[in-house]
Amino acid sequence: MIRRVSLLLTTFAVVLVLLASDSSAAEKLKLLIVDGQNNHNWKATTPVLKAFLEKSGRFTVTVATSPARNGKEADWAKFRPDFAANDVVLSNYNGQLWPKPVQASLEKYVTGGGGLVIVHAANNAFPQWGEWNKMIGLGWRGAGYGERVTLDKAGKTVRTAKGKGPGAGHGPQHPFSVVVRDRRHPVMAGIPAEWMHFRDELYHGQRGPALNMHILATAFSAKAKRGTGVHEPMVWWIPYGKGKVFTTVMGHADYSMKCVGFQTIVSRGAEWSATGKVTLAVPKTFPSAEETSVAGE
Ligand code: ZN
């Protein structure tokens, strides 16, 4: 009898713990931004990323800044971001290859279920790091590096072989229309099927292994804007071990990142890659098919 009561109590305790962990879904997620080197103005863009992620109310944000290019070896030896202490890592880094222990630590973190978000030129980084290239799927590489993935007029995925067609590039910056390709995905649910992104670079010809790639949004790369005449991937995700890697090639500059569409997709993408769920709402100020929308200060 005593045993039965204690079993009942144990069951009751387990239920309580489950209920408690469910209500903790509203607790803040720990998000780590990595920066320190980039061919873009990371000193201007990291504060924009940090501000809108914090403003969402869903994240506490810390920043790990690497040593500068050709920094002292002693400084690199101290650069050991604690990925595992975070729910999601966002890379705003494009520069020297990280030391081996940092690479191994990121691989272990994502394999174990950690979330990773790649913004714009972060996908230009590390062509020589094989596992990184599997995580991002497509990166800013020459045509000879790997396959290319685009969508045709009917929305069908087209894979172009290594060495064929254009490599990475972009035309002049302009506002452009983004087409959502998976409206059932939690990040895209409730987002207009087509919306105008504020002034940005429209990346084309990205190359890589592109394995298990789930394309969530594309943009038409117009030849009139020195583009390719096909739909190029703008947002995608790739499973890596138990983790999820969420990439957007949008976000060239601080002003591009002020687009409400960009901010919504990066915030929701970060939440989803960390938890597999999205609780962040689509704001009323989200861009429409005709009009861009820039967040106020
Ligand atoms: Zn750029």
Image (cartoon, helix red, strand yellow):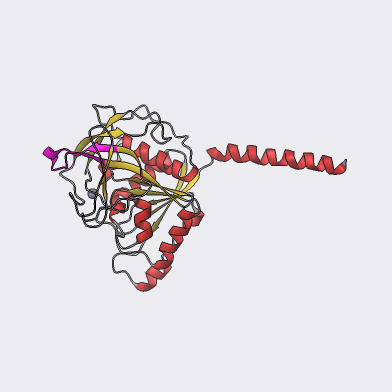
Q: Residue at x 47, y 52 (%)?
A: 241
Q: Residue at x 25, y 57 (%)?
A: 145
Marks counted in the figure total 0
Q: Quadrant of the N terminus?
A: top right
Q: Is residue 230 magenta?
A: yes
Q: As drawn, is 5 to the left or to the right of 125?
A: right
Q: Is residue 110 magenta?
A: no
Q: Residue at x 61, y 41 (%)?
A: 21
Could you tell me residue 116's position as x and y percent?
41, 50
Front residue (pair 4, 195): 4
Furthest toward the left, the residue is 224
Q: As drawn, is 54 to the left or to the right of 248?
A: right
Where 270 falls versus 107 (above or below)? above
Q: Quadrant of residue 173?
A: top left
Could you tell me residue 110's position as x and y percent?
46, 54
Task: For residue 179, say whether it is visible.
Answer: yes
Where 121 falls versus 96 (above or below)? above
Where 197 falls versus 111 (above or below)? above
Q: Quadrant of residue 216?
A: top left
Task: For residue 296, say whether it is visible.
Answer: no
Could you tell me residue 96's position as x and y percent?
30, 64
Could you tell me residue 39's position as x and y percent?
24, 56
The residue segment tinted magenta is 218-232
Furthest toward the right, the residue is 1
Q: Quadrant of the C terminus?
A: top left
Front residue (pair 261, 297): 261
